[in-house]
Amino acid sequence: MKRHLLSAADLSRDDAELVLQTAEELRSLADRPIKKLPALRGRTVVNLFFEDSTRTRISFEAAAKRLSADVINFAAKGSSLSKGESLKDTALTLEAMGADAVVVRHSASGAPHRLANSGWVRSSVVNAGDGTHEHPTQALLDAFTMWRHLGSLDGRRVAIVGDVLHSRVARSNALLLRTLGAEVTLVSPPTLLPVGIEGWPVETSYDLDAVLPKADVVMMLRVQRERMHGGFFPTAREYSRRYGLDGRRMATLQDHTIVMHPGPMVRGMEITADVADSDRSVIVEQVTNGVAVRMAVLYLLLGGSEPAVSTEGLSE
Amino acid sequence: MPAPNAAPDATTDDGRTVLDARDIGRALTRISHEILERNKGASDLVLLGIPSRGVPLAERIAERIASVEGYDVPVGSLDVTMYRDDLRMKPARALLPTQIPGGGIDGRTVVLVDDVLFSGRTIRAALDALNDIGRPKAVRLAVLVDRGHRELPIRADFVGKNLPTSLVESVRVRLQGIDDVDAVTIQGSTEGEVA
């Protein structure tokens, strides 16, 4: 897991399984009267969010606080960033404050890499979503949710459906699920598949109805209208008809198949309300699991004298 | 089960055997009776094993209590990793299972079960961990081996065997379920004494 968590591709299979097992132990904390562990007492975690986020920021904040870390929330709005401060100057400020970990979300792909590899900060950097690039803790919590429902992911078929082009969740999931032995099929209109998709370790399809009966997991993605500058599909209705998950399509799934969504959902667009609220839907559980997985990541990065598991690539 | 024909003090590649399978069985039977005697019965008892080898020991004690009293004592496990005082001195360690029985520990007598009592630091961590889970009526400590060298004011209530050791020796407990045999061995510079 090295010192930073920037990409799902950085995780070896052993690393990823260690995160999942650690998260499994930490999940039971939610059932205890005192939902706190002392592991990160005296450590400071900074949530550095240059882009709007509700669930990811709250999830990281809850995770850090349950491990007894001190949490500083730093949102772009209302900070010096809106006055034109650069990423570098912000980083130097955080370094001067003695942050042990920086959880960063940025609209620019690669910003967390810059922060981690520039020498500006000594803290661990956790990527909480950068542009259309990656969102590794989302992939870990998705894998954790699948693992809890299906057991080993070896040979499991996962369909990731929708706006792959703008989705950092899809990329991180494709990389991590491959590492864990699952077979990923991306289902999307041709206009919403990224250039270079041939190099991803996945199958692709334009036909949702053909993929659904074989899938063990169906993960619906939000159509990210805010990142779209152009016509990627004719109308929302046509998109829903071809790539939306409704009750009729859900009926073609195998009995054990689960339906996931990283949130926020647009009900009626990529998923209908009856599917989102059905027994197959694990969407609310994904949020619960997110806290446990982020606790596991923070614990493994910060809990010991140096990050757990492989130190390959470690510079110091 | 391998025939316990190796007499105590037999030197093997694995070190000197100080308790074989029968010895361990007898020690656990005695501990079980002592727990019952001290607690005046099995009611309100909760056994919490400290992973990994405290857990099978707690289960075996529960089996013996059930056969004597006809009462199933709740058994669980308590991982103390995050409460250790040396957490920051080593790379972050994998967590082990914590399973608190359904009835909880509030108002009950908790017996912590571990394989070896040494510095006492694990038990201190366990007491902190218990504090976050509830408020037991009392906490007792049962260990298979007490090897001395305490660094904190902690002692065991129930001891399988007191084993004076030197600091250069290491005590290894193997239990079926986790290992292939039941045995307690000592490794280190003791060959001279044995002969």
Image (tube, rainbow, N blue to C red):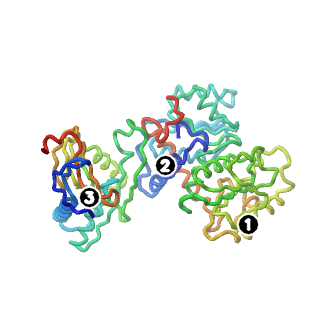
Q: What amino acid type should be assigned to the residue bearing mark 1?
A: Asp
**What residue is shown with label 2?**
A18
Q: Amino acid at mark 3?
A: Asp
Q: Chain of mark 2?
A: A
Give the amino acid at mark 2: Leu
Disc 3 is placed on an element classified as loop
Which residue corresponds to mark 1?
A246
Q: Position of residue A11 (x, y in %)?
A: 56, 44
Mark in front: 1 vs 3? 3
Residue B1 placement: quadrant = bottom left
**Residue at 45% in and 58% down:** A31
As displayed, is residue B52 above or below residue A89? below
Q: Residues within 10 Å of mark 2 (few under 14, many from 20)?
A: many
Image location of residue B61, percent across then percent down: 25, 63
- Horizontal placement of A49 versus B101: left or right? right
Determine which quarter of the picture holds residue A146.
bottom right
Residue that numbered label 3 is attached to: B182
> Is A171 displayed left or right of A68 in the figure?
right
Asked if both marks, 1 and 3, belong to the same chain, the answer given is: no
Q: Chain of mark 3?
A: B
The secondary structure type at the circle numbered 1 is loop
